[in-house]
Amino acid sequence: MVNNTFYYRKKSKNYHQFGSPSIEVYEKWSPHVCSICCLKMVGDTFGLTNEFSLYQLTMKALKLGVFTENKQTGEISGAFHKPLVELAGILGLKGRVEKRLTINKVKQHLKEGKFVLLSIDSNQTGSHLILVHTFIENKNSFIIHDSEQILGENGENIKLTQDQLNHFSNYKGISLWID
């Protein structure tokens, strides 16, 4: 089970909580950090990222190529999964890019004590990562965190049936764990 710290991507307008040096920098980056929110929730669970702000992790991610920034337009692209797994490794997590992440595979990873950053299709943002952290066998449902609050009002501990998660999933993502 993931720890009690849930990171919202856009709910808080407190740029200091994000760790940003200014409101402008916060507004530039906050729409793009669902992957970093997921990574931090997993990292904090194991005590690996507690000392880092979302902004600090985002800047580390930028340096590794998790995000790219067009110097002319300022447009940000990403998050790219391979360098995100590299960042997770630097922080002390094990991880793997999952190119065909079926619901059964998600269940298997959770049974093995792994966390799943699942890519979903969103009409609002295109692809978006959510953190799948629990499977409830007798209810055939998953518990997820959604930092953009697309799948639920507060984004925290949202319960989705297997069919619902399958509907949103684009079958890509990342599995993360610790040895």
Image: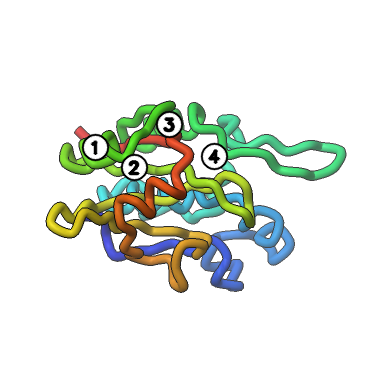
Disc 1 marks a residue whose amino acid type is: His
Q: Residue at x 54, y 39 (%)?
A: 60
Disc 2 marks a residue whose amino acid type is: Val
The residue singled out by tag 3 in the image is: 85
Circles 1, 4 touching at the beta carbon (< 8 Å): no
Q: Mark 2 to mark 3: distance in Å?
A: 12 Å
Nearer the observer: mark 2 or 4; the answer is 2
**Badge 3, how many Cα within 10 Å: few under 14, some, many 20+?**
many
Number of numbered discs: 4
The residue singled out by tag 2 in the image is: 116
Q: Mark 3 to mark 1: distance in Å?
A: 16 Å
The residue singled out by tag 1 in the image is: 109
Nearer the observer: mark 3 or 4; the answer is 3
Image x and y of residue 148, in percent:
52, 61
Image x and y of residue 32, in percent:
61, 50
Q: Residue at x 43, y 48 (%)?
A: 167
- Residue 15 picture quarter: bottom right
Q: Mark 2 to mark 1: distance in Å?
A: 7 Å
Is disc 2 placed on a helix, strand or loop?
Answer: strand
Circles 3, 4 touching at the beta carbon (< 8 Å): no
| First in residue order: circle 3 vs circle 4 | 4
Q: Mark 1 to mark 4: distance in Å?
A: 27 Å
In this rendering, position of residue 10 left or right of residue 73: left
The residue singled out by tag 4 in the image is: 60
Nearer the observer: mark 2 or 3; the answer is 2
